[in-house]
């Protein structure tokens, strides 16, 4: 057993960033290797933790590290993980590992790029394992801010506009969070004699008044929701993801958006159950708008990156719908969808990056028949596409099935519209929208990879290279692996959902 | 008896001696390399700082001097430490600037020390007149310092503007103090305190205190008394601007705390409205106006207006946590803002102007300096885990505790807004191409000063020790 495994996972990228900072600018290989090794450590370690958590039938929070930080207001560095945290940590580790390889070809200011990327990942890991609300917020901001420079320097298109828009949107979100958080700190009704604290475990057991819960949950929902891409506050996401460089899109759409959903689950639903109950109709309704709106807009895009970005908006809707349903099955599906979508989108953005690097266009209409030139990329893209609309045998199927099953039966007897439960209507609407998803995914696949090939323009294109295969094989393989054998993951997640379900 | 009192006033006396010493040094050595005077001043400030810090354990209880005209307590000590640190960093950061731009180097550092001495008096004042003496000593020195760059007409304009508006503020102060004296019959804080708790606050006293506070709002550049700040900040020599924006602002806050949280604490329900208005307006107006600036010093001036607004949240809370928040905020702000002005000094010296476009491609021209500036700006913007974040968090915290939800909401939203203009500088440094701008060389003195600032800003990620000191200092009131 390794001592302080979670702290190592959080700190490893940070230390790697510091090492990269002192490596000479020209030594690109060393910079990349340091980053890859740090990412590798986090993958191995988080996989090991998941394995032992499952294998030793652990439950609740494990691998606890704790140290007082600022004593009198009750802030402590407190990291611990349950099944949900662990599975999302593993997802993050995998995506950053692949992201490092997908960025192997970044030659412009490589050193700064990897520094910022690693710093960002530190924040992401931190959010997933922090059990102190204050550190949760702190890591959250660390995860958001490097994005500005990452998109601003290495992005494409209207990058400065996108970077600023994304940063300001997300910071407005964190402002909402901060107000909600301070409110939670002061409004907690703690047992007599217990000093005030930001400890999430304590706060989740603290009794809050109903009114407070309703107000605070709304603040948190808006705050986290902006990052999760809820309609109508999602507009930063397509612009940001389309402008960002490959690895950053992968991380942002693949992992960072999940921070938002995770925050709603861990802090919102975990600490303010009554508030959550009171707002679930809104969360569910907006989630379905996300699903429908995202997939329709994706259908109308010509820029490949915008298609993927809007598909993320749509898929995050599935996650939020699962959260809104608030039952074991749907929550399990929501977390599964976070992971499935994280891998899928990571794969998509990596592939878009590869295609763009070769064809120098992201215009769907301008491409065609590329499958002959790059069969590997085409296969990986197809796997991702199938997972995207939830074909059985892919991870998307498991996740979406669980969400829709759970949603259909959720909140039975409440929120009736003309005698029909609201959530049944929502579930039906969401399922129908999946057909739209299938349409745009198949359209993209057909336009880019099939049909006649413009020999003059694209005749000399090549398939993926060595380092790039890492990304495709790992992520594509996982989509299928989870699709075929989901039970370890669903067990890992399902065992930790009890705390969010109230009778 | 006298010797004992003088022993109590060691920091003040040493500051006075240091001021005289550097002026004499300049007289003795008229020509040649006089950079050592700057180094000497920085070292002297550090030595006085150590002497001041040593008094911490003697002052578990406040010690009144001369019947309470001056009060020596931990609050005063922590503010004195802030002034001395600002002086030390400014002195070190001015070494090159002074040798390139000024003829009278000794007087420059001498005035710096005199200004610090005035601020020290303000921080320990136990009487409206002591406060006035300190205020005048501090600001008179600063008027001259603002106009110190004789070759630059802007600097002269800055000095004149500061003098005229500052004199008006002093007049307002005196008028307010005379109203207070007229109604209560004393200028001594301790006596005013007992009168207020006995008889409550009458209209004469209320107006008088309002005038007093207005004059300090001028000092800390809170809206609507901020008009002087952008012009003076822009025109004054950059190291002086840095000093002005940190130490002088902190001195204004020390005075506000002495008056409002001291004798006027019982009347808090009366004056909080006024402070809330100052705070809210400063945060909104300061940030909005900063958005439009193209000159880094003007931008930092408006950002300073906004920062004063944040710090006022702590005063408006009128609570122990609020006082702690304000003290901690001012402490970290000293390093953050002074650091930013030092970088501005360096860039300004090598490019010859203070436009934000001078920062284009700074990350290629001098990566270390760009990184330092980035850290400092993010701290100003309140990004965790840097010191500015903690500073704001404790203030907002105090605000929420005292039920000032609206003000805190304005503050949080204003911080988001502020990030826009801080990021515009980051954009210039990291995203814009370097074009044909010159590379920037760093002199050891400024480098030391910048490194110290950045290290503190990063080091305050663990705010515990300083927070404890601020906590004990805030005990002066509660």
Image: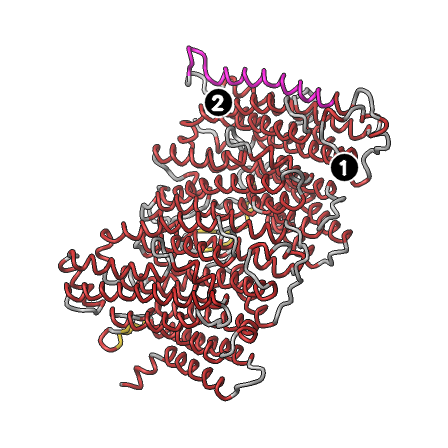
Q: Quadrant of residue A332?
A: top right
Q: Foreground residue, A192 or B383?
A: B383
Disc 1 crowd, CA 10 A, few/some/many (<14, 14-19, 20+): few
Res. A121 mark: none
Q: Horizontal and vertical percent for residue A161?
A: 58, 40
Crowd tier of the residue under label 2, counting other residues whose Cα lies within 10 Å: few below 14, some 14–19, many 20 or above: many
Q: Which residue is outermost to the left? A: B199
Choose between A125 and A377: the one closer to the eye. Answer: A377
User: Is B64 left, or right, of A464 in this rendering?
Assistant: left
Q: Is residue A52 above or below residue B200?
A: above
Q: Chain of mark 2?
A: A
Question: What's the distance in space between the residues labelled 2 and 1, CA to CA?
Answer: 39 Å
Q: Looking at the picture, how far across and down is residue B30, in whole percent?
A: 52, 86
A266 or B416, which lies in front? B416
Residue A417 sits inside the magenta stretch: yes
Q: Which residues are magenta?
A: A416-445
Q: Which residue is mark 1?
A: A357
Q: In percent of the image, x 23 and y 51: which residue is there? A: B269
Q: Position of residue B214 (x, y in %)?
A: 29, 58
Residue A15 visible to the viewer: yes
Q: Secondary structure at mark 1?
A: helix
Mark closer to the observer (2, 1): 1
Quick one: quadrant of the C terminus of chain B? bottom left
Whether B208 is drawn above or below A226: the answer is below
User: What secondary structure characterizes most of the magenta part?
Assistant: helix
């Amino acid at each position: 057993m390794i001592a302080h495994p979670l702290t190592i996972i959080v700190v490893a990228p940070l230390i790697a960033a510091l090492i990269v900072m002192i490596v000479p600018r020209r030594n690109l290989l060393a910079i990349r290797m340091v980053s890859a090794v740090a990412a590798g450590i986090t993958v191995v370690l988080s996989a090991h933790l998941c394995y032992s958590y499952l294998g030793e039938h652990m439950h609740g929070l494990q691998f606890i590290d704790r140290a007082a930080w600022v004593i009198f207001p009750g802030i402590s560095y407190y990291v611990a993980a349950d099944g949900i945290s662990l599975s999302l940590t593993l997802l993050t580790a995998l995506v950053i590992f692949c992201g490092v390889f997908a960025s192997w070809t970044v030659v412009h200011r490589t050193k700064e790029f990897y520094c910022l990327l690693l710093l960002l990942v530190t924040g992401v890991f931190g959010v997933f394992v922090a059990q102190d609300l204050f550190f949760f917020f702190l890591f959250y901001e660390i995860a958001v801010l490097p994005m500005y420079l990452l998109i601003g320097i290495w992005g494409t298109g209207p990058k400065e506009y996108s970077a600023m828009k994304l940063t300001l949107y997300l910071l407005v979100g964190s402002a909402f969070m901060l107000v909600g958080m301070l409110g939670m700190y002061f409004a907690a009704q703690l047992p007599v004699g217990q000093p005030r604290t930001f400890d999430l475990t304590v706060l989740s057991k603290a009794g809050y008044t109903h009114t407070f819960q309703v107000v605070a949950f709304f603040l948190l929902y808006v705050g986290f929701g902006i990052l999760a891409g809820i309609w109508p506050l999602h507009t930063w996401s397509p612009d940001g993801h389309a402008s960002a460089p490959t690895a950053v899109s992968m991380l942002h759409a693949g992992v960072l958006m999940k921070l938002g959903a995770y925050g709603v689950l861990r802090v919102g639903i975990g600490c303010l159950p009554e508030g959550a109950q009171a707002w679930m109709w809104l969360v569910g309704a907006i989630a379905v708008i996300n699903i429908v709106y995202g997939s329709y807009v994706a259908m109308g895009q010509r820029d490949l990156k915008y298609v993927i970005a809007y598909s993320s908006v749509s898929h995050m809707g599935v996650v939020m719908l699962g959260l809104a349903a608030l039952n074991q099955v749907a929550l399990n599906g929501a977390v599964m969808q976070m992971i499935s979508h994280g891998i899928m989108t990571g794969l998509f953005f990596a592939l878009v990056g590869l295609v763009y690097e070769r064809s120098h266009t992201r215009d769907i209409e301008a491409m065609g028949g590329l499958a002959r030139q790059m069969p590997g990329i085409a296969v990986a893209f197809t796997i991702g596409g199938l997972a995207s609309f939830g074909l059985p045998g892919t991870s998307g199927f498991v996740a979406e099935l669980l969400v829709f099953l759970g949603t259909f039966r959720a909140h039975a007897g409440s929120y009736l519209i003309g005698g029909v439960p609201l959530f049944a209507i929502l579930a039906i609407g969401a399922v129908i929208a999946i057909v739209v998803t299938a349409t745009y995914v198949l359209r993209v696949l057909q336009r880019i990879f099939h049909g006649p090939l413009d020999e003059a323009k694209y005749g000399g294109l090549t398939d993926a290279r060595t380092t790039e295969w890492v990304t495709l094989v790992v992520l594509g393989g996982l989509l299928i692996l989870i699709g075929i054998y989901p039970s370890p993951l669903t067990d890992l997640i399902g065992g930790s959902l009890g705390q969010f379900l109230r009778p | 008896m006298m010797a004992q009192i003088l022993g109590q006033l060691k920091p003040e006396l040493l500051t006075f001696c240091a001021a005289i010493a550097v002026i004499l040094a300049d007289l003795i050595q008229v020509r040649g390399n006089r950079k050592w005077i700057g180094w000497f001043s920085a070292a002297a400030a550090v030595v006085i700082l150590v002497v001041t810090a040593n008094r911490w354990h003697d002052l578990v209880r406040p010690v009144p001097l001369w019947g309470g005209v001056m009060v020596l307590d931990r609050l005063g000590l922590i503010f004195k430490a802030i002034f001395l640190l600002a002086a030390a960093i400014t002195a070190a950061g001015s070494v090159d600037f002074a040798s390139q731009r000024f003829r009278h180097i000794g007087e420059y550092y001498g005035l710096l020390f005199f200004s610090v001495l005035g601020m020290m008096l303000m921080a320990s004042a136990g009487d409206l007149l002591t406060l006035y003496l300190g205020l005048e000593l501090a600001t008179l020195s600063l008027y001259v310092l603002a106009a110190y760059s004789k070759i630059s007409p802007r600097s002269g304009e800055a000095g004149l503007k500061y003098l005229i508006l500052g004199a008006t503020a002093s007049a307002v102060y005196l008028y307010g103090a005379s109203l207070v004296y007229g109604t209560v019959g004393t200028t001594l804080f301790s006596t005013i305190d007992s009168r207020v708790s006995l008889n409550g606050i009458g209209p004469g006293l209320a107006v008088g205190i309002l005038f007093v506070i207005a004059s300090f709002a001028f000092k800390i550049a809170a809206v609507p008394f901020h008009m002087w700040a952008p012009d003076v900040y822009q025109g004054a020599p950059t190291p002086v601007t840095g000093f002005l924006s940190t130490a002088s602002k902190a001195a204004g806050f020390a005075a506000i705390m002495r008056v409002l949280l001291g004798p006027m604490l019982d009347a808090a329900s009366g004056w909080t409205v006024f402070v809330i208005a100052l705070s809210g307006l400063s945060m909104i107006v300061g940030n909005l106006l900063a958005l439009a600036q193209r000159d880094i010093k003007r931008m930092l001036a408006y950002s300073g207006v906004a920062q004063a607004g944040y710090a006022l949240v702590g005063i408006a809370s009128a609570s122990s946590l609020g006082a702690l928040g304000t003290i901690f905020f001012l402490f970290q702000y000293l390093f953050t803002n002074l650091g930013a002005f030092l970088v501005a000094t360096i860039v300004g010296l090598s490019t010859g102007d203070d436009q934000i476009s001078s920062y284009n491609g700074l990350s290629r021209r001098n990566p270390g300096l760009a990184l330092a500036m980035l850290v400092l700006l993010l701290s100003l913007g309140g990004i965790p885990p840097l010191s500015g974040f903690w500073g704001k968090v404790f203030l907002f915290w105090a605000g929420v505790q005292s039920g000032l939800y609206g003000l805190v909401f304005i503050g949080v939203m204003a911080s988001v807004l502020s990030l826009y203009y801080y990021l515009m500088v980051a954009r210039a440094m990291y995203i814009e191409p370097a074009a044909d701008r010159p590379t920037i060389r760093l002199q050891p003195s400024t480098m030391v000063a910048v490194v110290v600032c950045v290290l503190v800003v990063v080091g305050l990620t663990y705010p515990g020790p300083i927070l404890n000191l601020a906590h004990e200092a805030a005990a002066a009131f509660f």
